Amino acid sequence: MIRPSSPLTMLLSRHTRRRTFITLVVGAATWPLAARAQQQKTPVIGSLYGVSAVEWAGPMVGFRRGLSEWGFDEGRNVAIEYRWAEGQFDRMPAMAADLVSRRVAVILVGGNLDGVRAAMAATQTIPIVFTTAANPVATGLVASLNRPGGNATGVTVMAGELGPKRLELLHEFYPQPRRSHCS
């Protein structure tokens, strides 16, 4: 003989089914997020230089040390894709395009305008961080030093522009330079 369900049993049964249904829906909705989080790849820094690896070895040691200070260690939680033009600057557009096709997180460009221009021509979305001795505003790399705009920013030493100012300051400190008489 089958007993009729009591109102309490029916309510609990409906409540349990609703809870199970909600759990399944929430689980199904969040599963892709969890799967994506597990499949996240190590961020990749694209490195584009017009010189050889040997010529830029010292600065790259400092760069890796700086990354490490921020918690990023090459090979552990960040990867670096190196491209060295070795003085063949005409290769830089192809190398920049290759880094963009590999979907790097950022492109680091060092030392010359050819590399920066090649990276800027290859992407308008991937951030580009450059180092240069040229004035980035005068060369058209950025709109201004305060607000570079676009996807490129960087560091400049502006050696040419600061040379006369350095001489002026030196003259202020030593208005009457003296010759040293060494035997």
Image (cartoon, rainbow, N blue to C red):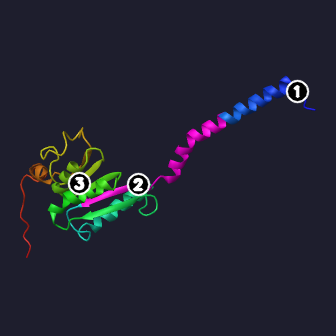
Whether residue 55 is situated above or below residue 137 in the rendered picture: below
Amino acid carrying label 1: it is: Pro
Q: What residue occupies the far bottom of the structure in this picture?
A: 183
Cα separation between marks 1 and 3 = 80 Å
Q: Is residue 117 magenta?
A: no
Q: Position of residue 171 (x, y in %)?
A: 9, 51
Cα separation between marks 2 and 3 = 21 Å
Displayed quadrant of residue 82: bottom left
Point out the stretch of residues depicted in magenta: 22-48
Q: Position of residue 46 (x, y in %)?
A: 31, 57
Q: Position of residue 39 (x, y in %)?
A: 50, 53
Dot 2: element: loop
**What's the mark number on residue 4?**
1
Residue denoted by label 3? 131
Residue denoted by label 2? 43
Q: Position of residue 151 (x, y in %)?
A: 27, 44
Cα separation between marks 1 and 2 = 61 Å
Q: Nearer the viewer, residue 124 or 80?
A: 124
User: Callout 3: few (<14), some (14-19), or many (20+) C-alpha neighbours within 10 Å?
Assistant: some
Amino acid carrying label 2: it is: Pro
Q: Which residue: 18% across, 51% down?
A: 117
